[in-house]
Image (tube, rainbow, N blue to C red):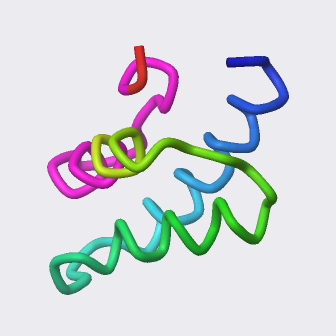
Amino acid sequence: MSNDHLEAVQNVVDRVTSYQDGAPEGTVETELRAGFEEAGVDVEAADVTRLAEAIESANGAIDAAAVLG
């Protein structure tokens, strides 16, 4: 994953993380997908799910690079 691609992913993750607290289940993954589409960033479905799970279980910011390995 290029630095530009990872930066775009992190920007979407940060945006979704900022308002995910108390969101109904499934909202985070839906918002990630919408954000990636809006940003023109292709992210594998399994990676979107991993990021959504990390956001939902975290109490604060997450590092997309660490989650995606």
Q: Let me know if residue 53 is in the magenta part.
A: yes
Q: Main secondary structure of the magenta part?
A: helix
Q: State the image coordinates of residue 1 (x, y, percent, origin top left).
A: 67, 18
Residue shown at 63% from the left, 68% from the top: 35
Residue shown at 35% from the left, 70% from the top: 28
Location of residue 22 (image quadrant): bottom left
The C terminus lies in quadrant: top left
Q: Residue furthest top?
A: 69
Q: Let me know if residue 57 is in the magenta part.
A: yes
From the viewer's perspective, is residue 64 above or below residue 50? above
Could you tell whether 39 is left or right of 52 in the image?
right
From the viewer's perspective, is residue 2 above or below residue 12? above
Query: What is the total number of numbered labels drawn onto the structure image?
Result: 0
Location of residue 34 (image quadrant): bottom right
Location of residue 61 (image quadrant): top left
Magenta-highlighted residues: 51-67
Q: 16 or 60, which is in the foreground?
A: 16
Q: 30 or 59, which is in the foreground?
A: 30
Could you tell whether 11 is left or right of 19 in the image?
right
Q: State the image coordinates of residue 55 (x, y, percent, origin top left).
A: 30, 51
Residue shown at 80% from the left, 58% from the top: 40
Q: State the image coordinates of residue 5 (x, y, percent, origin top left).
A: 76, 32
From the viewer's perspective, is residue 63 above or below residue 30? above
Residue shown at 57% from the left, 44% from the top: 43
Q: State the image coordinates of residue 52 (x, y, percent, origin top left).
A: 31, 54
